[in-house]
Image (spheres, rainbow, N blue to C red):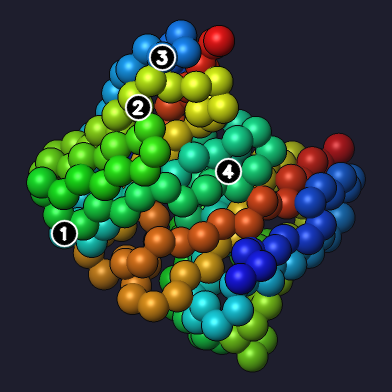
Amino acid sequence: EDQVTQSPEALRLQEGESSSLNCSYTVSGLRGLFWYRQDPGKGPEFLFTLYSAGEEKEKERLKATLTKKESFLHITAPKPEDSATYLCAVQGGSQGNLIFGKGTKLSVKP
Amino acid sequence: DTGVSQNPRHKITKRGQNVTFRCDPISEHNRLYWYRQTLGQGPEFLTYFQNEAQLEKSRLLSDRFSAERPKGSFSTLEIQRTEQGDSAMYLCASQGGRGDQPQHFGDGTRLSIL
C-alpha cells in the first residue's frame, strides 16, 4: 500500500536556525513527489515537484531533495513568515491522485 | 490565471440535510480532483475528473456523496443526509498538462455539521 510518513510532526525554530523536514514514502512506481505549504484556513500551496532520485529544487530559503526512499525539505535561515504546515505527497503508478502525509507544523520565532 | 475558486468558504448545516459545494478550476485545466481534510491530517483523495468524465472514486466516497463536472468546466460535490463524520474541509484541485504535473488547490469549503 502506498504510504507517506512525515517527521517531525511539529518543529519550533528560532529565526535564522536552519533545519530539515523529512518525508519517507513507499509507492509503486513513483511518478512524482510534491511539497506543499499550507497556512491555517487555506488550501495547500504548491512549492516543488521532484521526479527522480538525486533531483534537487530550490526556492528562496527552501531546498527539496529526493532519494529512492525519502525526501528532505531544507530550510535555511528561516523567518517568522515561513511558519506554516508543510505537506509532502506522492503520485504513483497509474494513479492521478496524490497521497499525502500528515504534515510538519513549523513555527519560527523571532 | 485566477486560481482555483471554491464556494461557499464555510457551510454550517444540521445533521441529515443535503449540501452542495462548487469548484471552479483554473481555466483550461482538464483534470479536477476533490479531497477531504480533517484537523491534523493531510488531504485524502475522494474523486477525480478528466474533462467531464469521472475516472476514479475513493472507497471514502460513500453512496451519499456524488460529484459532477458538466461540460468539463466547474464541478459540484453533493453530500446527502449529512452525518457528524462529514465535518471536514473539502478541497478542490485542478491540473493541466501531463498527469504528473502539480495539482493546484483552492482554499476549500469548511463543512460543520451541527
Amino acid carrying label 4: it is Gln
Q: Residue furthest bottom?
A: B71
Residue at mark 1: chain:
A
Look at mark 3 in the image and give the residue it sits on: A16
Real-space CA distance between mark 1 and mark 2, rounded to the nearest whole angstrom:
28 Å
Q: Secondary structure at mark 4?
A: strand
- Residues packed near mark 3 inside 10 Å, few (<14), some (14 to 19) or many (20 plus): some
Q: Position of residue B93 (x, y in %)?
A: 55, 62
| Disc 1 versus disc 2: nearer the observer | 2
Residue at mark 2: chain:
A
Q: Secondary structure at mark 2?
A: strand
- Name which quarter of the figure residue A39 lies in: top right
Look at mark 1 in the image and give the residue it sits on: A29
| Closer-to-camera residue (A50/B19) | A50
Q: Are marks 4 and 2 in contact (CB under 8 Å)?
A: no
Q: Quadrant of the C terminus of chain B?
A: top right
| Disc 2 versus disc 3: nearer the observer | 3
Q: Position of residue A65 (x, y in %)?
A: 21, 40
Are the numbered discs 1 and 2 placed on the same chain, yes or no? yes
Amino acid carrying label 3: it is Gly
